Amino acid sequence: MPSSLTHIVLLHSNDIHGDFAPADRDGIRTGGIARLSGFVHDVRGREEQVIYVIAGDMFMGSVIDREYKGLSTVKLVNALEPDVFSAGNHEADYGLSHLLFLEKCADFPIVCANIYIKELNRRVFLPYRDVVRGGVKLRFIGLLTQTVAEHFRQEELVDDAVSIRDVREEIGKVLAETAEDPADVTILMTHIGIEEDKQLAESGLPGVDFIIGGHSHTRMEEPLVIGGIPIVQAGCGSGQIGRFDLYVDKESRRPDHYTWQLCPVDETVCGEDPLVAFYYDRFVAETDRKYDRTLVTWPQTYTHPGFHRETELGDLFADLYAEIFGSDVFFLTTNVIWAREMGPVVTKRDLMVSFPYENAVYELEMTGERLTAMLHHIYRREAWEGANIFFLFSGTLSVEVRSGDREIREILYRGEPVDPAAHLRVGITGYVFRNITPFLGIGQEEIGDTVTVRKLADNDRDAMERHFETHRTAAPVRFGRLTCTD
Amino acid sequence: MLNITEEVIDREHILSLEGRLDTVSAVEFDRVMNEHLKGARRIVVDLTKLIYISSAGLRVLISARKFMKERDGLVLRNMSDGVREIFRVTGMIDLFEQE
């Protein structure tokens, strides 16, 4: 390397989602939080100038995280010692007020430029963090997807108090605010997904050198360069890590060139960090004692391979909700189920991991006519084409959709056309209720008028657990209730 | 700021720490510890004058403990109440031999 250049190693992770346990991949122990930390600390020991950043969504996805409401995760991340952590949408899953407590427990800076206290017009977090290595000042600006607003709605007071502002405008603001104290290298840590990253870069970002993204779990083999800006993401979980080798010209103090690779984190390349392994083993021992007990044994394994289609597991749970809460038909969003498969043996841990969110349950009483209109909203064309939300429903209902234009062809309730005058009890989760207008197309003005609302339960997972105590197996699932035909 | 005093008596190596063992000072402590790990039968870390220990410091101690397991071990001596509380909260209080 020419002596005119400063070499900086920039490691990055995103969307680790509580993936703290090592996995066996082709006989090789891969990932796990202790090995990820081992990798980071190995590089810190070998290289002179090292920075490690995490681009959001460290929380959720494991019993360890859930049991301690993220405090366990903060303890593990403290030992990972990231230089910067940008908030992801799942960091708010325990509520923004709790996240602010977790921030106080964190021994690392959490950045996010676009969450504001509305009334004070003031940011909730630090917008950026400067890290100096080898005399080079690197500025990391945190940015969060606006879909996080759905999570804030769990806390009515907080939802009223904060807003998530436009990403692009906030980048401009931060750059303007720091114009008199410019960095040598500016990096956006965007937890907005690869598609929005691309749009952002396409629209032109003067003053920005790199984008380290998250949210879409995109596993990249090489950077995507748009408008001269390399965009990278390191997939999800702890089995791999992104690595920039960045060469900065000492005189101009600008990036001269770089390489990037997605590095495996497995036993062939690094050992485990004994400190993180110690913490992790303790958490595992404590949660195992509590959660490794069988709740129910099903006749088979049920799968949930995707979010935009009917799945066996989705059908099974929609039926279970309908049975538990006495609904004529229950609607469940596919994203509430985090497991790819469950059963035949289901432990409490499986239930916690597969249903990480506790939800209230509501009943909407409506006519068959209103239900039909709601179904047309739910299965509008956009729902099939990568929208965040997709619904499944219990087996009393059948919906046939035309493949080409996604128009609904037929709706049957208990095998018969829906009676427009019938009064039906429709079950939904609290998450859907909080988003009743965008998700179901039911306006606030209809509530109490054409749609009657009743709260059935505060915690769906507790209700499910109680149900399993007396129902040790599952009824057969009728697959094919949502069909697409030519 | 961390001061490390080193003393060797018949392959018992005593490292006395004074000040804060944080992310920055842990790098030097790690280097010193690794030097002593090579030839020590037993290592004693005297914490009488240590006022704070971070994750990075705990990592050095836990790694050294692992390394010394097959010898006479690593012993922590004279923890202050503040440092003891950190060991207690992290669950490490019973992990190390103390005197």
Image (cartoon, coloured by chain):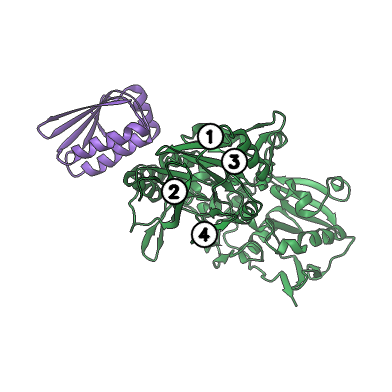
Chain colours: A green, B purple
Vertical placement of A176 versus A325: above or below?
above
First in sequence: mark 2 vs mark 4 = 2
Numbered tag placed on residue A11 in the rendering: 2
Estimate the spatial distance between the alpha carbons at disc 4 and disc 3, rounded to whole Å.
Answer: 27 Å
Between residues A61 and A344, which one lies in front from this camera angle?
A61
Image quarter in which the C terminus of chain A is found: bottom right
First in sequence: mark 2 vs mark 3 = 2
Q: Residue at x 51, y 41 (%)?
A: A85
Between residues A250 and A74, which one lies in front from this camera angle?
A250
Q: Are marks 4 and 3 on the same chain?
A: yes
Question: What is the three-letter code of the residue carrying label 2?
Answer: Leu
Q: Which residue is mark 1?
A: A103
Chain of the residue displaying label 1: A
> Which tag is nearer the camera, tag 1 or tag 2?
2
Total number of numbered labels? 4
Which secondary structure, mark 3?
loop
Q: Which residue is mark 3?
A: A94
Q: Which residue is mark 4?
A: A219
Which residue reaches farthest bottom? A486
Q: Residue at x 80, y 47 (%)?
A: A453
Whole-percent x and y of residue A127? 58, 36
First in sequence: mark 1 vs mark 2 = 2
Chain of the residue displaying label 4: A
Question: What is the three-letter code of the residue carrying label 4?
Answer: Arg
**Residue B33 image-quadrant placement:** top left
> Which tag is nearer the camera, tag 2 or tag 3?
2
Q: Are marks 1 and 3 on the same chain?
A: yes
Between residues A63 and B80, which one lies in front from this camera angle?
B80
